[in-house]
Image (spheres, coloured by chain):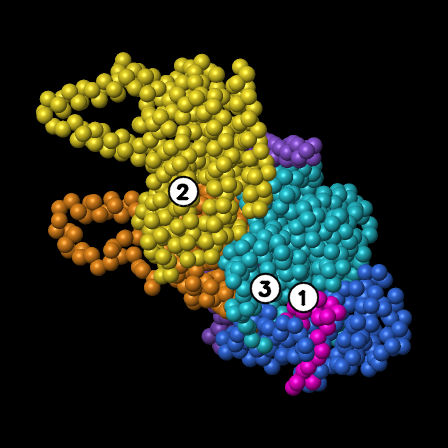
Chain colours: A blue, B yellow, C cyan, D orange, E purple
Amino acid sequence: MIFTEILDKLKAKHEVLESKEDLGVLNAWVSAKKIKEVIGFLKNDMQFGQLSFVTAVDLMAANNIEMVYRLFSYETKSDVVIKVKLDRAKPEIETITSIFSTADWHERETSEMFGVKFLNHPDPNRLLLPDGIDMPLRKDFKCADMTPLPKV
Amino acid sequence: MELIKELLYNSGKPLGELYTWAHGIWAGWGAPPFLLDLIFQIVIGVAVAAVVVLNALWIIYYDRKLSALMQIRKGPNRVGPLGLLQTIADTVKLMIKEDINPKAVDIFSFWIAPLIIFIPTFAVFLVLPFGKGLIPADLNIGILYVVAITGLTVIGILAAGWGSNNKYSLIGGLRSAAQIVSYEIPMMLVILSIVLMTGSMKMSDIVAAQSHYKWFVIPQIIGFIVFLIVGNAEINRAPFDLPEAESELVAGFNTEYSAMKFAFFYLAEYTNLFLTSAIAATLFLGGWEGPLLPPIVWFFIKTYFVVTILMWIRWTFPRIRVDHLMEFSWKYMLPIALLNLVITAIVIKLV
Amino acid sequence: MTTKAPFELEKLSNDEYILNMGPQHPSTHGVLRIILKLDGEVVKDLYCDVGYIHSSVEKMCENKKYEMIMPYTDRLDYLSAVNYNWGYALAVEKLMGITVPERAEYIRVMLAELNRIMSHLLWYSAYGMDVGALTPIMYAFREREEVIDMIEGMTGGRLTHNAFRFGGFRNDLPKDFMDSLKKFIGHFNDKIDEYEALLINNIILTARTIGVGVLSKETAINYGVTGPSLRGSNCAIDLRKTAPYSIYEKFDFKACVGKNGDTWDRLKVRMDEMRESTKILKQAMEGIPAGDIMAKVPKIIKPAPGEVYTKVESARGEFGVYIVSDGTDKPYRIKFRSPSFSNLSVLKEITIGSKIADVVAIMGSLDLVIPEIDR
Amino acid sequence: MNGVDEELIKKIPGLPIVMTTAEWAINAGRSNSIWTLTFGLRCCAMEMMATGAPKYDWARFGLEVPSASPRRADMMIVAGTVTKKMEPVIIRLYEQMAEPKYVIAMGACAISGGPFIYDSYSVIKGADKIIPVDIYIPGCPPRPEALLDGIIKLQKKIMKQKFRTVKEHK
Amino acid sequence: MIKYIADIIKGIISLMEGLLVTLKHVFRKPITLQYPEQRPDISLRFRGRLAMPIDPATKDNRCTACMICVRACPNHSIECEKIVGEDGKPKPKPASYTYNMGSCIYCNLCVESCPFFAIIMSDEYETGTEDKASLTMDLAAEKYELKGKKAAWWGSKFKTEG
């Protein structure tokens, strides 16, 4: 399935805010409220059976946190990337754990690394970090005992 | 020279002569005879203790070397010639290591457990027929005594598991209790078949019944195999080492033990191994009987043969699971042992 | 956002108790903490606490040049470091549009397959220890040392090879590599038979593993399980076949699958995979062409803005690298999608109801490497 | 044994010789029976396993006795990265070990943080920041021979120690 | 009943197979290397500690203090300072070349980046020590002499290319 085909099918059912092709893969931006439906649609109706990962990118300049959901279809051997822009000050998004169980841990990791709050998450605890370190993957993260690499 | 030969081949006679000779002298001094008996008991006790400890040290070394041989490596070879002093070094280290009593332990059972485990293994040596007449105490219920005394070990393991106040220890202790109790039964049944064949529970009689190379291993081959398996399970050695299953329970019932208290467990484990093998050798392989070499040497050769088999099994197999362990005992070992007993009884009746 | 106790003590019934396994536990392969809710020996519930070796690789990589990240990918999964190198090199090469010369691709395949064998051998020995057999490790390490010597001869490192460069290799294969490879392939299959006789086919182990920890195909895919653990569930998904990268289409091999998805199937798949890897090695050894080993690569690695995701089949499953480039010589964001991360998350699903000993056996069959979970 | 009056010992005839012999015997016992705590953290753990494997075989030095429980371990090999989440666990394990105890910091991570020395928010920069370390073995990871070499160096260190002046790490 | 007996026989056969494997290994030669006495043959490309060998021709190191290796190091294990001449201008020779072996990750990136073949990963690996401070060393002052096959390899490199 090439990306235009996926895009057409996706557009027919759901609102796609923005889309682009990146190295042959469709990147589609959707709104935060719709994420559960879009992912559910992709899984159930378009055979995207595997959620490769969920992560986020801190776009500090645009004051956004961008959620990245990457799906892969074992049947059609194609990828699709769903992205959601969230407000950096108060990032909140619905969990997709009920659709993909693997999202559980990925979301927990994203949550502690970027401070994204996943609504209705079954186990909203920390996964990797000890207490005391918050949102380290944000670009403006500062930590007292973090020695910066000396400039050469 | 003659005396040494006599001592090696027919130890009972010179020892008896020594006993009566000493009593004669003692009576000449006018001292009460029970005191001399006490002295004799102490001397025998110390001798047995020395044998137990040195033998355990040697058997640990043997285990390590044998495992190395099977695992295409060298094993200990740095301390002393061929690494023979390795276990001595371990002992020295364990003796002077800090003895930790964790805060939360039940101090009484924590302390008493290593002793309860060690003493029975020590006591069983009293009825082992090392050679012709060389048997510290030839009880007429010898084999029953062995079974009864080794059964005590489970109390020690339970005490260790309970007293350590550690969940791993507790699980290990309880596993061990279940295991030893359920494996006691097939073991008894196998021993019973032997007793049926000899008509006596006396260790010397059992050996005597196998004289002229009529070893019980031939008619009782199934019994022998069952005894090896069950005996291995009784002493908690791999693949039945569930109470101390390293990958599951860290170190099982002895997780919290350090230094000398642990050394007791360690020595007891290997002494038990020796004991089981020695009993197997006595019951099935004709005890000390053998050509050319002195009886005591034959006894050790046969025992170490069984030890080697048990070690071979240990270094080959993965660990059995706890419910399979029970299943194995009740579904396989018990019926087979029972069948063996019935067949033995019928054959004895018919012949 | 805070750590809380996974099981509340008040809610435990009279028969239940909590057992803590790890972080320092002989069977957790490093530092994984598992909290078990038990009833006797039966596991009622389970909670994985990871992150004990979280070393902030993703954050550090944002401040490193592209070339410098290569050694860090070694240290994510030290057992199949070559595959991890490859995943990362592939990502940057795709971003930069570099085509790797054919000889280099062959060398990559050979190293990767050797590395897979090495990883599976370590898994085999560690699994032996998990189930209480202490000899398999000794035999497996004998062959593993042979493989390590070969890889070391090529790359210079025993575990952390830092083997790949963008566009190919720095050095060609050493002279004696082919000879030792030939020798190794010659006797390795017999050794696998020995391993199977010693551990995998042993009745004690089959009794412990058949029908235990059954992972259905649907659950596996839903949890994102990949690699041999997924293939054990009768699901022929191997990225070398389903989404071929490099020159894997050229080789004749099959994706090994299990039947029922129980623990034993996962073990068997790994044993079979070693045989398949030897097949690939044999073909690669015969087909390797002469030629360049390095493509023309700019001196300074500065990819155009954009993002890329590449995945390779590591010894544990799908390893993916997601790079967001902003046009500088350092990545803006880099995310490693590690297979063990998803593979571990399914543990709870397949363990509940089994025994303590099964937890160890099932966990071992998933072949976890903790640093790649924690990163 | 701390606080033994050296002068007093010298006064009693024969005692110094007895003491040195005892010291030698004890040190020989200690140095030849180093039971290791199986404690792997990262890549170095694999090389630790390789050291136990037949090609290098640390059993030759009497090290192979498995001691999963820290209670009877003599040596802890910190083989890998020490993180903040792991810190209390390592300290606890160290305290659970019985005296005398030794620590080998294996690999760059355990010496100084290694690859994670800069820019890392969750890595402790060296095991010696939290527990006393006896031997440092650089390498990333060190070869098994390097570990054996470190162990031999530790044995030499143990042989040199006087039991009247053994430091108690408290 | 038949299944019961078949199970037992099958089990015994599988156990015997396992026992046979270990038995076979008893008669194989141990592959152990007696380490301190016997040493393995280490491959040419093995990466031991970093060294700045002295060139046998000039009896001096080949470093020009160009700082490329310092920039190539992923975790800043190398620090280098140039000699400052009497005129106040830096000269292409290192005054000090500090190498922190304790943090080095042996990745070879510095060696590969060096255009003058001044540094090399030697085959020295027995670097364990009791003293952490001794892990930080000044390579420029060390006058390291490369030996064995690695020396020949290193020499051939800059003679043909340099």
Task: Please state which of residues B21 and B89 is positioned toward the viewer in this rendering.
Answer: B21
Q: Position of residue C9 (x, y in %)?
A: 51, 68
Q: Amino acid at mark 2?
A: Thr
Marked residue nearer the N-terminal end (1 or 3):
3
Q: Is residue A88 within the magenta segment?
A: yes
Q: Which residue is mark 3?
A: C47
Q: Position of residue B271 (x, y in %)?
A: 39, 36
Q: Which residue is mark 1?
A: C336
In the rendered view, would you say C190 is above or below E79? above
| Outermost residue to the left | B29
Q: Secondary structure at mark 2?
A: helix
Point out the stretch of residues depicted in magenta.
A87-109
Q: Amino acid at mark 1?
A: Phe
Q: Position of residue E6 (x, y in %)?
A: 68, 33
Q: Secondary structure at mark 1?
A: strand
C-alpha span from label 1 to label 3: 24 Å
Q: Nearer the viewer, mark 3 or mark 2?
A: 2
- The chain containing the residue under callout 3 comes to C
- Quadrant (top left, top right, bottom left, bottom right) of the N terminus of chain B: top left
In the rendered view, would you say C4 is above or below D97? below
Q: Position of residue D91 (x, y in %)?
A: 43, 64
Q: Nearer the viewer, mark 1 or mark 3?
A: 3
- The chain containing the residue under callout 1 comes to C
- Disc 3 vs disc 2: Cβ atoms closer than 8 Å? no
In the rendered view, would you say E6 is above or below D47? above
Q: Which residue is mark 2?
A: B153
Residue E134: image quadrant is bottom left
Q: Residues within 10 Å of mark 3 (few under 14, many from 20)?
A: some
Task: Tell me which residue sits at (61%, 65%) in the image.
Answer: C375
